[in-house]
Amino acid sequence: MWNRKRANSLLMLEVLLAFVVLFAVSSLGVSLWGNYRTPLGFAYQQVWAIDISTPGLAGRAPRTEALQRIGQHLRATPGVLCVTRHAGNTPFANANNTGDVSTGTGPDRRVVEPVNYLDTGPELRELLGLHMQEGRWFDRRDEAANYRPVVITTDLRDALFAPGQSPLGQTIQGPKDWHETWRVVGVSGPYRPDGALHEPVPGVFLYASAQDTVHALNGLLVRVAPGAGAVLEKKITDDIRTLGAGWRGTINTLDEQRLSQLKVNLSLPVILGVVCLFLIVNVMLGLFGVLWLNINQRRAELGVRRALGATAAAVSRQVLGEILVLTTFGLVLGLLIAAQFPLLGVFNVKASVYLTAMAIAAAGLYLLAAGCALYPSRLAAGIQPAVALREE
Amino acid sequence: MATTPPSPTAQPRSFSQAASSAVPVIQLRNIEKIYQTKTIETVALSQVNLSIGRGEFVSVMGPSGCGKSTLLSLMGLLDEPSGGTIEIDGRPVASYSDKGLAGLRNHKIGFVFQSYHLINDLSVLDNVELPLLYRKGVGNTERRRRALAALDKVGLNARTGHFPAQLSGGQRQRVAIARALAGDPEIILADEPTGNLDSVMGEEIMDLLLGLNRDQGTTLVMVTHDEQQALKTQRLIRFFDGRQVA
Ligand SMILES: Nc1ncnc2c1ncn2[C@@H]1O[C@H](COP(=O)(O)OP(=O)(O)OP(=O)(O)O)[C@@H](O)[C@H]1O
Ligand SMILES: [Mg+2]
């Protein structure tokens, strides 16, 4: 049976190819699905990002003042529940500001990169419904602090501090050329402003007080009352225009931004998925062809088996069994290749993603092989014993 | 199981013959076999009426192309007639399911093909084991033992690990005979089983078949071109151009 080396190695190659494609698709799928299932860590409904332009204002102090005035006005506007200053990297904005964060010095130095730098006012926690895990969020105490107060996310804490070591009160360093030292006042849950499909990135919330003239000057985030819509949007943009000459506010709801970002982030995987589907169909046709050819070359043998008392079902089982054995050999080869990905940590993807993808790809491979083998095995079952008399 | 498999140390079957000796093992009624190809229609058999009694040893002779192999393949349930009925132990073959037919081919009949039809990818021993592979309740060691015993009978026990391509024509023929014997069938249908053997070997195989018929009551139908051999059997049937002439 195992003398048919050439036909069998061809089959195994097809199986291997199918597995590689399935593994690639599954890895991508599992990774995206895992990201999608991970909570964003904040509530984006009824939150609007207001991009504010104040042409003609030179310098940061007047800009700060303008944002303060607009903020105060909005806080007094009915329907607006909460307002905070924010840098340009508001959730789903496709804008980011990342760099490294480190602790310790010399050989004890630990560096994490990338980390999302999130310059924001003290109202953000309430506004986005962030969850605190340890310590506290920003408050009045922070106005007089020597080091800039920060809240880090759990994933940053876990990467930066040894297990059991409390980060509270510890100082951490920002990027080298900034020469900034920050003091951790609290730890929040994961925060994923880059959206559901993006790999989670550790984050550090950097405190910007009301008087801060350096950070968080891009615009405002506001939480509005449920049901607030176009009317409030118009009122806010109109009001901003009246507050200063040439001032303008552009409102994007986080809901809309989330959807448009999702569409953009999904397009590449969808294209890849379609390409892989074509590849799989191709491989399947190849597999089917090889199997079909294989059965036709073995008509005499199968006829002899029938003549000696094999039932149609036994012949069909034999063919299916042989294919499943070959599939298993191809699968083992494929798994050896696939195992390199988690072992070498390729693409910075968690090992569990690759392991799940391997399991899915293996299951898919058996289904695929069984699917391709179904018709050839029925063909084999249909071979009459009289064939044994004629063909040689 | 439709039929009880014969025990390995087969007893003479004459014991049960008396009760059913009236019913032929194989009965052909008005058999026609027409091979239809695109251009021509070959009448391979026409109006064949034949009954083979239990424990009989029948030889079939006739010129090349007269339909001998066709006749044997119909008796061996490898092909279906174009007309007429075949009965095995009095039961029409058409009434069997695919599974039932497979069971008959496996348990009841041993077939020696004119051109051997060994499976090239299998060793000699595996080839001989094949009929037992499709028989329920025969374990690995038992299968091996019976296959080795059959190879021993045809004098080939030294070549069990060879592949068919490594054997001479005569040796292949003997493997084919051993394969038919391995299942210990009630009926052996042999298509020129000594056609490729030298006279000494042919003689030995003929003695083996005669011994099976005599000692175990095996029913035998053998196609041959050798008058001497045919004379040793109980009945000689002659065919000419698809018809039985004697
Ligand atoms: N599969 C087939 N298709 C068409 N014609 C066939 C087929 N098998 C046999 N024949 C024809 O049927 C006739 C009988 O063939 P068969 O093989 O039974 O002859 P035979 O008596 O066994 O001859 P030989 O002694 O040469 O083996 C021949 O004319 C042959 O050409
Ligand atoms: Mg013939």
Image: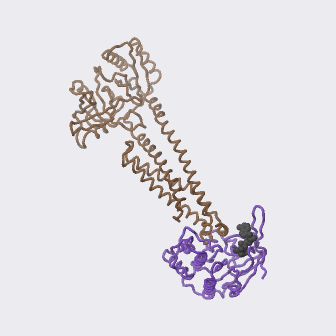
Chain colours: A brown, B purple
A160 w.r.t. A242: above or below: below
In the figure, residue B102 lies in which quadrant? bottom right
Quadrant including the C terminus of chain A: bottom right
In the figure, residue A188 lies in which quadrant? top left
**Residue B180 location in percent, x, y?**
60, 77
B63 with respect to A320 (left or right): right
A389 w.r.t. B62: above or below: above
**Residue A75 location in percent, x, y?**
36, 20
Which residue is found at the position 42% from the left and 49% from the top?
A356
* Count of labels in the image: 0
Q: Is residue A178 visible?
A: yes
**Residue A336 location in percent, x, y?**
42, 53
Which residue is found at the position 37% from the left and 19% from the top?
A74
In the figure, residue B23 lies in which quadrant? bottom right
Return the residue nearer the eye: B31 or B231.
Answer: B231
A362 with respect to B59 (left or right): left
**Residue A41 location in percent, x, y?**
36, 36
